[in-house]
Amino acid sequence: MKKLNIYDNIDKSGDEKVKEQTYIIENCDTFEPKDIFECGQCFRWNKQEDGSYIGIFGNNVLKVKKEDNKIIINGICIKNIEDVVKQYFDLNRDYKKIKSQLSKIDDNMKMSIKYGKGIRILNQELWETIISFIISANNNIPRIKGIIEKLSKKYGNEIIFQNKSYYTFPSVDELSRASVKDLRELGLGFRDVRVYETTKLIKEKKVDLQELKKEKDFNKVRNILLTLPGVGPKVADCILLFSTLKRWEAFPIDVWVRRVMNELYIHNPEEAKVKKEEIEKIAYEKFGELAGIAQQYLFYWKREA
């Protein structure tokens, strides 16, 4: 049976519904909704007919729309919307400084940054990021989104926003109720066992996510992530970069990143023979601790343009 709307237990106002909140970002030239939500880092944001994007993260449902030079964000949050938005969209980080620093490296970076000037790396919840990117393995974006939506609808909690139902990503406890068969029926394919086993390891704290967040050694965190079923090097780097772990030295390598790095810096006539280690060496030499954000600009530029 579906649980009650997540806000039912906190609404103390009788028949009055939980009110929407609004937050407006003024004169922001480092925030472009399309760049943020379509650069491959997240799967629960969808474009609407009016050009806005609606997304679900944590216990929040937000609608983001750019009008002139304003970013208008409204939705349902348990906490203050300004605090939620600043944390999730990493608004306290100086992206102008980052873009200026990277643009000085070479013309390739300057061009890719110009193309994806509004990219911001989101602070996504670690647990959700782990499961989402396990699901993403050998998969396409529409199918990934569909699987995550079905998973959330079955095991998450409902939130009503503008007369429509949205569903939170299931917690570790909630997802642990799913058997391998249950997951298979949701269309996970070969990923069903991996999601099941990873959920079990995290629930039993054989991999402790809170301890992982405290660990400062990049390689140690990465190696622990690699012990999770379904987490290979690329998925581990995506988790490191796109979650609240926020390790910007992570450099996920997929077919697009391999292609753009080869075309711009390696020039091997046989792209398939370009080794991951060769790409990583160049990335760290050129971009250093900003390798992850450099990867996002290059990836988005190559894939979209």
Image (tube, rainbow, N blue to C red):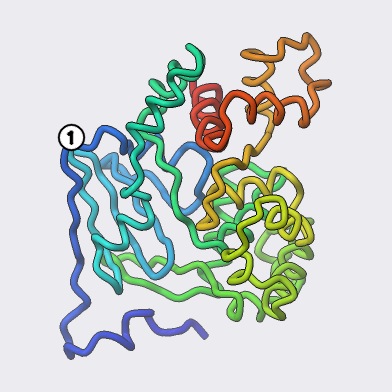
Vertical relation: 148 (above or below) 301: below
Q: Is residue 17 above or below residue 43?
A: below
From the viewer's perspective, is 53 left or right of 2?
A: left
**Coordinates of residue 299 in the picture (x, y in percent):** 56, 29
Kind of element beneath mark 1:
loop
In-front residue for pair 183/121: 121
Which sits in the foreground, 145 or 90? 90
State whether residue 189 is above or below residue 275.
below
Going by the picture, which residue comes out furthest to the right?
273
On the image, the x and y values in percent for residue 63 come to: 29, 53
Residue 287 locus on image (x, y percent) = 56, 28
Q: Is residue 221 left or right of residue 102?
A: right
Q: Is residue 123 left or right of residue 180?
A: left
Q: How many numbered marks appear?
A: 1
Q: Nearer the viewer, residue 289 or 259?
A: 289
The residue sitting at 31% across, 35% down in the picture is 30
- The three-letter amino acid code for the residue at tag 1 is Asn
Residue denoted by label 1? 69
Residue found 70% across the figure and 47% down from its top: 137
For image coordinates 45% across by 76% down, the residue present is 157
Q: Position of residue 59 (x, y in %)?
A: 39, 70
